[in-house]
Image (tube, rainbow, N blue to C red):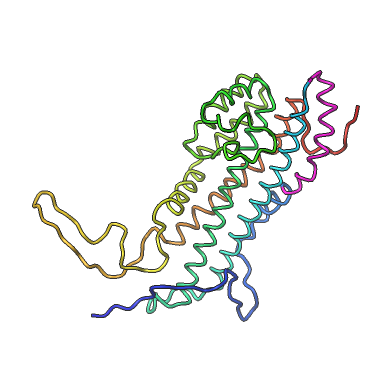
Amino acid sequence: MTQQWISALSFGSFSPPMTAEGKPAPTDPRKDVEEIAMRWQSHSGKGSAAGMSSVALLREAGVTGYGPLINRVVEVHGLAGSIGEQLTLAWAAEQDAQRWRSSGPGEDPQHPQEVEYAQQRMAVRALYEMSSHFLLGTAHSLANLVLRIMLCHPAAAEVINRDRRVKSAQGFPPGSAAKGAWQTFSPAGQLWSKTLPQAAERSGLSPLDALVEHLTALQSDPRFVALEARRGMDYHRHRPQSLDQASPAQGTWSYDASSKTSRVALGGVRPDPRSDEAAVHDVCVNALECIADAVHAAEPLIGAGLAACHLDWLPTSIRLM
């Protein structure tokens, strides 16, 4: 029997096809995520003002040699704006995935491999993966922002810079583009789960404790863990193909040690269960909600942490002395 299937597919654009009623709308606009992302983008516009007003706060507290701290608070505001943009891009990709799902023809049980349906599945999954990419960047940047706030306290900075894992960061100078100055945020990262809590404890400041606890809660959140695990498969291992195929990951040859026999089985074309766009959707949307909530809840904690170090966050006016 001859088996026929779609072996390759390209569609040229991620824009969903137009319908007779016009461009399909997302079923869930997630306006709360968009509002958080837009607000955080605007934070970078206050970096210079925060640096200037922090000069007055540091002088009042009797802090000397504070030049690098001024650059640090400017860097923190710029990084916050970057986080907002990453979250915006994650939101936009997820919204387009919804448009694709609502515009597609849906699966015909009699013709499950119709080109239009296959295109829909491939595009939807890719857009969720694109959203996940920017979500990982958002989480990574949030962790590095928290790290930089911790570095504003001398005792906490001493604990962090003593960690051998950050030796290549060379003290995390503000504005550094060195690879070592930007640490990877992952569920297994001990810099975040051990070193930062130790640094917060050494500082003796409860606002820094609260900020680090918030970050470690995100690090261990099952929704973030699932996102990072999916990324590991898609980027570092065998990303499953969206189309049905005849090259299963486990191969077609097997060996039975008890009978000392080998076997080759030519199976039919079948889908890889790991390519299910619905599963990718669940991982993406759960992570979108988780990370957006983490970004939103971090805002007052960031303000309190910087204030404890005599630095300003989102100033409404510049204080001069």
Name the quadrant of the C terminus. Answer: top right
Instruction: Determine if the magenta segment contains residue 224.
Output: no
Q: Residue at x 67, y 21 (%)?
A: 154
Taking depth in this image into account, of 294 and 129 the one nearest to the observer is 129
Instruction: Determine if the magenta segment contains residue 54.
Output: yes
Q: Residue at x 45, y 57 (%)?
A: 279
34 horizontally vs 320: left or right: left
Q: Residue at x 60, y 64 (%)?
A: 96
Taking depth in this image into account, of 19 and 92 the one nearest to the observer is 92
Residue 309: image location, x then y, percent: 73, 25
Residue 128: image location, x then y, percent: 53, 59
Residue 236: image location, x then y, percent: 43, 50
Taking depth in this image into account, of 36 and 132 the one nearest to the observer is 132
Above-or-below relation of 243 to 295: below
Q: Main secondary structure of the magenta part?
A: helix
Above-or-below relation of 266 to 288: below
Name the quadrant of the N terminus. Answer: bottom left
Q: Residue at x 72, y 51 (%)?
A: 38
In the image, the segment drawn in magenta is 41-64
133 horizontally vs 173: left or right: left
